[in-house]
Amino acid sequence: MKPPHSPMKKRTVKQPTPGERLIRPLVRTLHPYTPGEQPKVPDLVKLNTNENPYPPAPAVLKTIKAAVDGRLRRYPDPTAEPLRARLAKLHRCSPGNIIVGNGSDELLALATRAFVEPTESTRLTAQGMSLSTVQYFDPSYSLYPVLAGIHGARHNAVPLHDDFELPSLSRLRRGVQWDFRAALSFITTPNAPGGRGYATADLDALAGLHKGVLILDEAYSDFAEENALSLALKHPHVIVSRTFSKAYSLCFQRVGYFVGPVELIDALHRIRDSYNVNGLGQVAAEATLDHLDYYQANFRKIVAAREQTAKSLARLGFEVFPSQTNFLLVRPPRLSAEAWMHKLREKKVLVRWFAPPTVRAYLRITIGTAQQMDTLLAAVETIATAES
Ligand SMILES: *Cc1c(COP(=O)(O)O)cnc(C)c1O
């Protein structure tokens, strides 16, 4: 007998294994977010993940240590109420405008789940919104496409200019690619890995044209000349995302927060885990707010080191993009960026290189202490001399 399918029908689709059959088809195809390396060797100068080179304030460490006692057996505050009250005071809004998360990454994921329809369709609402579209500029934070993928949403990645500037409003409006009706748009400001800060006035004008939710991801705003927090308290569809990780030396504790309109923040509270922020993280973040002077002094040191390093690298032949963050994006001379990354690692300096085509020509270098920057520059000089 003839087989039921002709050879033409033979497809190369791999049959799922019995284990894979138990997994949702969407999830079978996903690739996880790639975090920067956390090396096991202790003596590397670690400039690859934008961590703060300075430890938390001594009083903050003391408060965290003092909190490690019998109370660990109890659940933490489910809504991080005391921390939200402190943050509300800091930002001159109400606690209802704030949600705290297990890092801001958790909140970015919750926003995708709360505001975006998980479907392949491009269905529009009565107001003309692309219900299933998650939108962001490229290059920016590489978590956004991962979140859209997990959710089964449509991605709209819109290229930035070659110098990482935002396309002008009139260009975006001419509507080639940027979709003002997207259910959810992410803008990293200042941007990563480009480093540029975007003017609040420009973001305000952009926000005014958006129909869906706009999240301004301000993970690096403490190193910038201005921030756009006021927009979250002005527009009914704008949220600003902040984190204690980078500027406040608390990556390990996982505490981030959103500031935004009560209705949107409420929606996120409805879908979060009951105890999404761990107790020691809440303690650490509250204590941090008592010592902002210490951190502000660190910001000034980091910004000074950034400007100094930018000049030195430019002298060594690097193209250096202007930065409002705690890192520099640079295009190294002579060798490929990937080769530079390996050569620097041999000299015990770890920097970040990204493989995607829009960023593969660059290195992203986190700003460390002045001493760490000296080590970096000495290594760069040795490599440059050997190559010239
Ligand atoms: C580091 C980073 C975050 C994540 O911060 P966490 O609060 O540690 O989750 C979010 N957005 C951008 C752009 C970042 O660089």
Image (cartoon, helix red, strand yellow):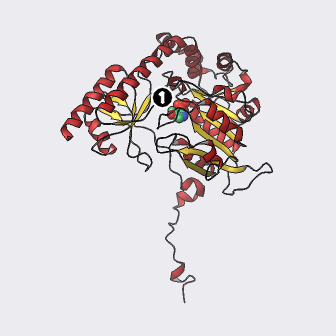
- State how many labels appear: 1
**Three-letter residue code for mark 1:** Thr
Is residue 133 found left or right of 53 in the rendered image? right
| CA neighbours of label 1 inside 10 A, class few (<14), some (14 to 19), many (20+) | many
Q: Residue 304 sits in which quadrant?
A: top left
Q: Residue 284 sits in which quadrant?
A: top right
| Residue 355 percent location from the top left of the image | 40, 47
Q: Is residue 148 visible?
A: yes
Instruction: Say above or below: 387 vs 225.
Output: below
Q: Is residue 43 visible?
A: no
Between 350 and 251, the one nearer to me in the picture: 350
Q: Looking at the image, which residue sits at the far bottom?
A: 1
| Residue 327 percent location from the top left of the image | 43, 30
Residue occupied by mark 1: 325
Q: Residue at x 49, y 40 (%)?
A: 164
| Residue 90 percent location from the top left of the image | 64, 16
The reply to whether the residue tagged 1 has its Cβ within 8 angstroms of ligand 1 is no
Instruction: Say above or below: 164 vs 3.
Output: above
| Residue 279 percent location from the top left of the image | 59, 22
Between 30 and 314, the one nearer to me in the picture: 314
